[in-house]
Amino acid sequence: MFKRIVSTLVAGLMAAALAVPAASAYELVMPSFDYRTGPYAPNGIPFANGYHDYLMMLNERDGGIEGVPVKLVQCETAYNTKQGVECYEKVKDTDPSRALVVQPLSTGITYQLIPKASVDEIPVHSMGYGRTSAANGKVFPWIFNFPATYWDQAAVFVKYIGEKEGGMENLKGKKIALVYHNSAYGKEPIRTLEKAAEKFGFEFMPLAVDHPGQEQKATWLQIRKEQPDWVMMWGWGVMNQVAIKEAASIRFPMDRFLGVWWSGSENDVLPAGDGANGYLSGAFHAPGDNFPVHDDIKKYVYDNGKALGERDRIGEVLYNRGLIAAVYATEAIRNAMKMHNTKEVTPAMVRDGMEALDLTEARLTELGLPDFTIPVKITCDNHAGPRKVAIQQWDASAKKWSMVTDFYDTMNDIVDPLIEEDSAAYAAENNIKPRDCN
Amino acid sequence: MNPELLFFLETVIGGLMAGVMYALVALGFVLIFKASGIFNFAQGVMCLFAALALYDFMAPGGWVDRWFGFTFPVWAAIALTIVVMIILAWVIERFVLQYLVQQEPIILFMATIGLAYVLEGVGDILFGSDVKPLDIGLPQGASDWLLDNFNLYVEKLEVVAAVTAAVLVTVLAVFFQRTRIGRALRAVADDHQAALSVGISLRTIWVIVWSVSGIVALVAGIMWGSKSGVQFSLSLIALKALPVLILGGFTSVPGAIVGGLIIGVGEKIAEVYLGPLVGGAIENWFAYMLALAFLLFRPQGLFGERIIERV
């Protein structure tokens, strides 16, 4: 009897010992706000795959970040603001680390999360989208939007157009139209373009397109009537494809049609066939799968059967965007580990890591991304980083995007006062005392 | 021609053509409502599902190509998609509708909401969510002849859609008015139990009407898919058909066409001439406003059947 009790106790203790996680079982919780369903899924899927594959590659190759595994928590937002907020509430306190950084992948969701995440002390990285004035780190300590904002992009587009017209002075009297998604996202560049129109004397013509943008006949009839010299587009999803096709139909020259970087993926141009040849879009990273990091992804993720997407779609524009988003997040975590001398980092530590991010070309090369994007340096007061934008162009016969310019600087004299004004208004509305960054 | 007048003409023609595209979607709703009294919330998703199936039968990289290493020519792919839509109609009747005979219209409507979600999910699993450029050889882009000779912008695809819609309406009108099945469909629409009592098989009729509606959905899916690529936002075109139905009447095939044309022209003129005054993007809600204005005077729509109920 005694033997049976002892053996039962020993077995029980052994089972308990196996059930208790080891001290090294700490995991880095990284939420992924995906949209693999709904009308915007064609764009959401490659981004989510790029984000997933980079993190899986780190887990497989390095055992995670500095040896600590990444716990990827995927949540489906369907690009719907309400669902996005629900996702945030669901994932923010995930054990063991809580959500280390949230990337909402939607301007609408970002606007909703700005006040919430600031209270919950979780850093939000709206990479090249979201509220532009979050660039002001003094007012938005928990929000980052590097490497550039929509306002920078609008300013760079005006600069590019000026260059093509033979000088900024030649913009006077020109007509520039903006075809935009009638949402918080689509409206972002309007103020910048209005300011630029005042400064350079061009006529600005905003034209809204309602969600989802399947039918745009009236918009393009107006463009045909008004004959703008250039058309910019802030579109997403089916709106992009229809707009490019309509532009081709009315014979609008494609090399005078410039889309935001969310209107410049393979999905947007392929349905228009040859008509899309020469179409331009903003970019902050290279397209293609010819970087060493892609080789590692193929080897450690695709060859091991851990991939969610198809191998031949590695390197698409939105795949690479998801990948670089994951790189920024993991480098911030790495930074946080060094700064706080612990591998069990918290969201607050990752915020510190992100604010001290200094991603040089040398470091990008180490990561397998030479000449992939611009170096990024974040500071306490500048959460938008380098704020540079390049232009890429679609070659319909080769079915490839290629960068056709260097990176342009933003127009600080136009954009900075707007950022200052908007962030000051937000601070006043929400009783926020700006931090001292000196 | 005076440029302003030419632009007005372009706007009206553009509106008429867009209206035909809406009417193609609305026709599917009308068929099912006319024959069974069901407002089929899944009609938009059926357009999407049909276009997805068609694409995968004929396109390199589709599942037929991936699994069997070949693709079907366009005509065979269309024929096979029609078979798929007929099978779908049978499945819907077998697993959804047969349990809902004589139920309240709201119950049937709710069932179609569920059906929409199921179809969308199944479509996603079977065919994937990527944008699929659909090319069955329909002409694309503006008519060069009109553009070069008259400076008039008319989309060739939309002209094809208009001709197709005309043919479709004629065929459907003959089908409903001149065939035994058509008469049986109308009898079922009037009263399920009375139709059953004279020996009409409700289940067969429902399969037929959902099949026809599926074929109409395929036509709409082809037109919209050729315009913007086949993708999940196609299911939202049902929203464009709603004001058309309100205006034209839920039970009238010609009503769907006339309603589509009025909505198309109305929203385009509103967007082009009133839009700039109020910040633009008014065409979506203007279509509903126009439909509501009609409702005030003709609650049954322009061509709908007047329903008098004792309360």
Image: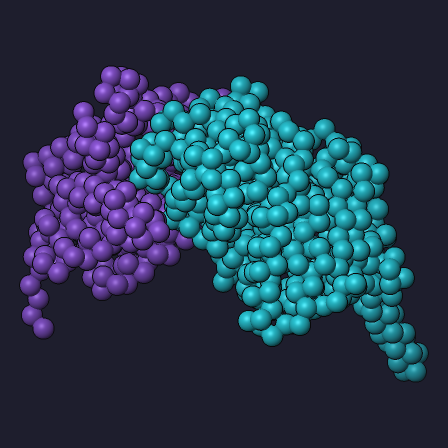
Q: Locate residue A160, reporting x and y percent.
A: 57, 33
Instruction: Choose between B46 and A358: the one closer to the eye.
Output: A358
Please indicate whether residue B91 sits to the left or right of residue A72 in the image.
left
Whether residue B38 is visible, yes or no, is no
Quarter of image, res B194: bottom left
Q: Residue furthest bottom?
A: A2
Instruction: Choose between A111 and B56: the one closer to the eye.
Output: A111
Q: Locate residue A295, reporting x and y percent.
A: 76, 32
Q: Locate residue A82, reporting x and y percent.
A: 49, 62
Whether residue A106 is visible, yes or no, is yes
Quadrant of the frame with the C terminus of chain B:
bottom left
Residue for point 76% across, 42% down: A375
Is B3 rendered above or below residue A194? Answer: above
State the colouring used for the structure image: by chain
Instruction: Give the drawing colour for chain B.
Output: purple
Residue for point 50% across, 26% down: A255
Quarter of image, res A301: top right
Instruction: Choose between A42 and A380: the one closer to the eye.
Output: A380
